[in-house]
Image: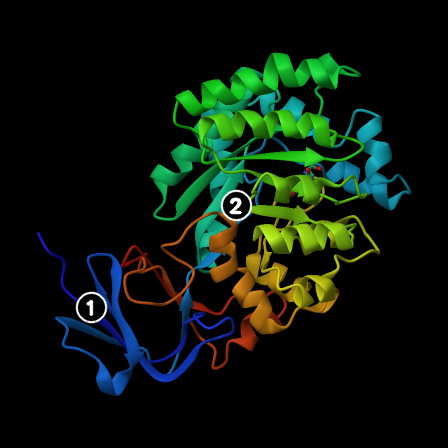
Amino acid sequence: MTRPRHLLSQCRLATMTDGAYGLIEDGAVLIAEGRIAWAGARADAPAADTLTKLEGRLVTPALIDCHTHLVHGGHRAAEFEQRLNGASYAEIARAGGGIISTVSATRAASLDALVASALPRLDALIAEGVGTIEIKSGYGLDRETELTMLRAARRLGALRPATILTTFLGAHAVPPEYAGRADAYIDEVCLPTLRAAHAEGLVDAVDGFCEGIAFSPDQIARVFALAAELGLPVKLHAEQLSDLGGAVLAARCGALSADHLEYLGPDGVAAMARAGTIAVILPGAFYTLRETQAPPVAALRQAQVPMAVATDLNPGSSPLGSLLLAMNMACTLFRLTPAEALQGTTANAARALGLQDRGRIAAGLRADLAVWDVQTPAELAYRIGSNPLNRLYLGGSEC
Ligand code: DI6
Ligand code: FE
């Protein structure tokens, strides 16, 4: 059965098609079969079966959160308190807290419990216009729990109209049973689990944490080699706390993105520019950890490395459940322009996930569209803690 052709009319369009807002002042969008059939000036709009008049509201592509750890057990409010009492993130991690405390809580949780605890976080993102969400594993660090996390992410995708993409992050931390034996963990757990997860259809991309408290570039390179063998795209947590050359490695491996990047140096910027690797900046972690070194945004801009913005939603370094707030923080803390912030959660976020069918308003793309109660696109990044979403269309259906 064909679905009616539906016209959204009397709206301002931020199409995000020109490297900036791509504004169309008095616009319209035709939705047919879940796709954008046409977008342009209202005066030129083709005929449709049904019509929604948006009374001048702004329409953007539905937002995309391209870096989250949304599935996890428990929370780390106690560490928040410890940090406020003087402990550093790295100290807490070395003492067996940090990521490892979430590993314990995640291992103790059932698949159903992981799904149930993640749903409110997912729903909050959807409620502010996010239509595509990447979710990483990496709090299991054993075969069964890594698989359970990825199955939970897939289940979330079945329960909600948003698109969920999964990323295998087995190289996130060394679990306690392998303390001091990171290489053995990679060989005995991480690589076989990646094979198993891929065989079960649970993996859309492969990520790692390249850091002194996690894995070396050589160890990450072994994970990426298996990803290449399996035909999976890679991305990397790189240069978050120090410069180990993670971004150069990621670029050399043709990574979709390198993420965090506070300590990224000129070599990394140049390598990313050459490889077309997207810079995903994560102001929630910078803010939470009270980091003082910002990612080299001016250098990335100058080298024309596309920037994306994401929540990094996780229980430790970024308990940030709002992508709109991440956009505001990217502007205020990192000096992105509001147009760059919106590019970062639409067109460039799609690229960071290897998606060509969304993130812009153009004929042929998925009809994932957010309608906002604002006049100008800059208002999306400008407001702090408000949610002006009016309605959301995903795959052409209002949700
Ligand atoms: N970098 C981060 O900011 C998160 N993971 C990572 O590799 C932190 C995850 C956590 O603290 O639980
Ligand atoms: Fe992360």
Looking at the rendering, the quadrant in which ligand 1 lies is top right
Q: Quadrant of residue 61?
A: bottom left
Q: Quadrant of residue 245?
A: top right
Q: How is the image coloured?
A: rainbow
Q: Is 99 situated above or below 355?
A: above
Label 1 – label 2 distance at C-alpha: 31 Å
Name the residue at the front extreme: 274
The residue labelled by disc 1 is 6
The residue labelled by disc 2 is 121
Residue 246 horizontal/vertical position (percent): 71, 40
Which badge, 1 or 2, is on the more N-terminal residue?
1
Measuring 59% from the left and 23% from the top, which residue is drawn there?
140
Q: Is 285 situated above or below 33?
A: above
Q: Amino acid at mark 2?
A: Arg
Indicate which label's residue lies in the foreground, 1 or 2.
1
Q: Is residue 30 visible?
A: yes
Residue 150 horizontal/vertical position (percent): 48, 29
Measuring 84% from the left and 39% from the top, which residue is drawn there?
82
Q: Amino acid at mark 1?
A: His
